[in-house]
Amino acid sequence: QVQLQQSGPGLVKPSQTLSLTCAISGDSVSSNSATWNWIRQSPSRGLEWLGRTYYRSKWYNGYAVSVKSRITINPDTSKNQFSLQLNSVTPEDTAVYYCARGPGTLNYWGQGTLVTVSS
Amino acid sequence: QSVLTQPPSASGTPGQRVTISCSGSSSNIGRDNVNWYQQLPETAPKLLIYSNNQRPSGVPDRFSGSKSGTSASLAISGLQSEDEADYYCSAWDGSLNGWVFGGGTKLTVL
């Protein structure tokens, strides 16, 4: 059974960097058949896919256009986890952030982390 | 605002059958499979239907999905109080190169 455990701060100041980690158990971040995604949810924007990382003989990333200039998703094979970094945050980035496993479907999700952007 | 369009609300009485629609375009539903997620309050979305009409293990057969062209629908028969939740459709968008979601439908069991 795949489990995803999220960690990271719940409060970030405007203009700073939001950083979250998703630890994987029951699968490998280096799996040749999985993708590792970040999604966020807010009342104003609904569910919004942010991006993914995946391994197919080499590492690939894909990001949503809305955040492409500010986002980095990195795998950490030594700890079997992947991370989200979102730079230059504003109050508009306040949301519940989820990690999830794909592809084809997002069939396993982390527990969610409420991140508030406020001074 | 969401790429996929769902009605914001739906309702039914226990035992009734309800359907929730999801409308997209040729770059998402028209070219790829549709998935449905159920979200209970304060929890992460849970996969309910995948590949248009497939149920993951453990999902009751009261839940069914269908797709036609650029639209899809979720049907819930024999409605139960525990079905009260938010429901989201989703598909991969080949133009945006990412997952897109509907705005969600809040189902109320009267």
Image: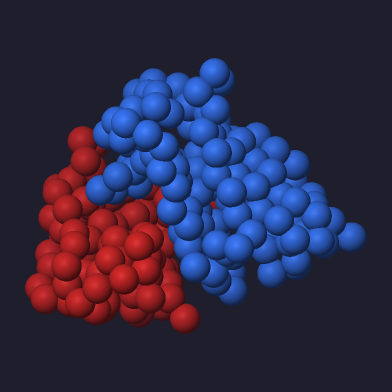
Q: Which of A33 and B53 is in front in this view?
A: A33
Q: Residue at x 14, y 49 (%)?
A: B54
Percent position (x, y) of residue A68? 55, 62
Could you tell whether A117 is left or right of A93 in the image? right
Tell me what residue is drawn at x 65 percent, y 35 percent.
Answer: A7
Chain B's colour? red
Tell me which corner region of the image, top left, top right, bottom left or bottom right, holds residue B69.
Answer: bottom left
Colouring style: by chain
Would residue A15 be found to the left or right of residue B92 on screen? right
Residue B13 seen anywhere in this rendered image of the structure: no
Residue B71's spot in the image, x, y percent?
Answer: 19, 75
Q: Which chain is blue?
A: A
Q: How many labels does the image show?
A: 0
Q: Residue furthest left?
A: B68
Outermost residue toward the right in this view: A119
Q: Which residue is drawn at 26% across and 77% down?
A: B24
Q: In this view, does A73 lie to the left or right of B19?
A: right
Q: Image quadrant for the C terminus of chain A?
A: bottom right
Res. A76 image quadrant: top right
Residue lying furthest front in this view?
A58
Residue A31, picture quadrant: top left
Q: Residue B7 appears at what percent x and percent y?
A: 35, 79
For residue A44, above or below residue A47:
below
Q: In this view, does A29 lie above or below A38?
A: above
Residue A119 visible in rendering: yes
Q: Looking at the figure, which quarter contains the N terminus of chain A?
A: top left
Residue displayed at 59% across by 49% down: A72
Farthest residue to the top: give it: A78
* B18 lies above or below A3: below
